[in-house]
Amino acid sequence: MKKTWWKEGIVYQIYPRSYKDNTGNGVGDILGIIEKLDYIKSLGVDIIWLCPVYESPNDDNGYDISDYRNISDEFGGNDAFDSLLKEMHKRDLKLVMDLVLNHSSDEHKWFKESRKSKDNPYRDYYFWQEAKNGKEPNNWKSFFSGSVWQKDDITDEYFLHLFTKKQPDLNWENPKVRKEIHNIVEFWCKKGVDGFRMDVISLISKQTDFPDSHVPDNYGETIKTYYANGPKIHQYLNELNQKVLSKYDIMTVGEGPGIDLETGLDYVHEDRNELNMIFHFGHMFIDNGVGGKYDPIEVSLPTFKKVFNDWDAKIYPKGWGSIFLGNHDFSRMVSRFGNTEEYHNKSAKLLALLLFTMRGTVYVYQGDEIGMTNVAYPDISYYNDVETLNSYKEALAKGRDMDAFLKLVHRQSRDNARTPMQWNSSKNSGFSDAEPWLEVNSNYKQINVENQEKDKDSILHFYRKMSAFRKANKVMVYGDYECLNEDDTNLYFYKRYNDEETYIILLNFSNKKQPLDFAKYDLANTDLALSNYSENFDAFLQPWEAQIRKYKS
Ligand code: TEU
């Protein structure tokens, strides 16, 4: 397998609005990130993925870009960005930009022109359709509630928006649009950035006859069948790769709702020249019922393991994967997969150990390195995220039990991951001198960076240990993966190995002591390399215990 920096590198994802406010207006900014670069470096991180910082009216916090070449003044503008890039490169840190190319903002100059008249030269930069039987052109639903079609009074036609109505979808069928996009990507490459995370890239090729979904109420199925993996997806990605990406030593990771095991490898196959990696959502949408995230279902450990097993088997050795358990769109990983009540420290460490011992590039989301948790605001007025607010309105209109729905919001809202970073126990958690744009999680006095710097047993120090371990043991990056107990409902055991060495990873995903079959796994023939407990026993694993063991022969 070819060795590269982006396979070995550890990525740290920053949601700039919530990281560190340097200018004192309650919103995180680029100067704030520069202030924290030494901290970031101390985590053993090599690459920063920066969520969008371009000019934007912020209907979806930057995922609605109104100018692809300029950095928003709110985040410090172009000068701050140039300093960031310089300061990062000085520290040998690489920068991956988030590019949103499936849609623009409706305040982008292309859309402002496009909506003016049917014969405007920019009309075909977006998808416009006439009404069908006096209604929307089809029954597709937006990711963020309601129809994907918005009627525009100026020309009396509908435009397509898979996300909010301020995020019209770009028409990649139009060669002029693709050329504009190639130029934008080239612009950032020339500036010296080191890669791109490409937002919802699986959605850029549309079925242009816009057929009705045969399962409009089945959210996941509709995305997979009608929105994602469209007929020209690979042609567009290959073209972008050949015309621009391949000329630079950069990394690309495509975000891929609707990409499944059948379609995944085509995006990342090393002979196909498209993307280096994708984010699939196998484990992230795992608790979504047919109605989506606000219709959750119970998940078992075997189902969770199966996602990792199936993807690993499918992708390697020809492709490469990404390993993550949270980002700015999901609830906090320790709240979701761990136990924040009784085993916050141990379960956060177990999840870190899983992340750093899996095959694929590792992505750490800001705040997970100190085990930041979900937030439970008292009512909906505290929330900011457009997806949360729209879902709430929809639930209200449908007459759902709103107390129960608020509990679902506590569990599922994207704002769980967007609360300000908890730096210390001073006012506003050391994030800002001003009132933060989103209220700080009330547990900041206990869970914060400053406390954990002082505590040798903290989650923070464990992350540093794990990143150092992965760097020192390349078998964790390139070695084969094999799950050893697919059906066990409490324990997750797997091997990472190459011709020279074999490791076994033992994870207890439960609140109880679990018997350990020492003989079955030949554990007498191993040395303990690392664990989240200071004392370990041959006969059992303690609650949320995690171990890495190395075979002697
Ligand atoms: O997310 C795409 C995506 O799949 C999400 O909308 C997901 O369905 C949802 O967040 C689950 O709760 C990307 C960005 O990461 C997200 O922040 C943007 O809002 C979205 O695209 C639109 O650009």
Image (cartoon, rainbow, N blue to C red):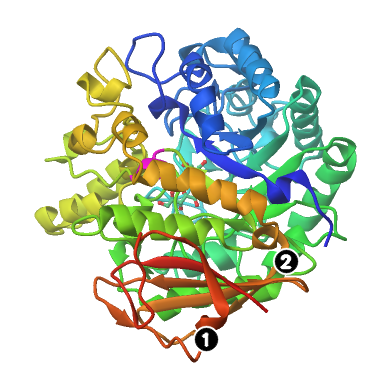
The answer as to whether callout 2 falls within 8 Å of ligand 1 is no
Asked which quadrant contains residue 47, the reply is top right
Task: For marks 2 and 1, give the one nearer the viewer.
Answer: 1
Residue 333's spot in the image, x, y percent?
38, 53
Estimate how packed mark 2 is, as few (under 14), some (14 to 19) or many (20 or more) residues with alpha carbons within 10 Å.
Answer: many
Residue 295 or 81: which is nearer the viewer?
A: 81
Residue 93 or 160: which is nearer the viewer?
A: 93
Determine the secondary structure under disc 1.
Answer: loop
User: In the visual, does 36 lie left or right of 432?
Assistant: right
Is residue 64 something one can see in this rendering?
no
Residue hosting label 2: 265
Per the model, the C-alpha gap separating discs 2 and 1 is 32 Å
Count of numbered badges drawn on the protein: 2
Q: Earlier in the sequence, mark 2 or mark 1?
A: 2
What's the magenta region?
367-371
Magenta residues, dominant SS class: helix
The residue sitting at 19% across, 59% down in the picture is: 342
Residue 123's spot in the image, x, y percent?
67, 32
Residue 142's spot in the image, x, y percent?
44, 51
Q: Is residue 314 above or below residue 111?
A: below
Query: Which quadrant does the N terminus fall into?
Result: bottom right
- The kind of residue tagged 2 is Leu
Residue 553's spot in the image, x, y percent?
68, 79
Residue hosting label 1: 521
- The kind of residue tagged 1 is Tyr
Is residue 452 something one can see in this rendering?
yes
Q: Is residue 107 above or below residue 135?
A: above
User: In the visual, does 332 lie left or right of 96?
Assistant: left
User: In the visual, does 367 lie left or right of 95?
Assistant: left
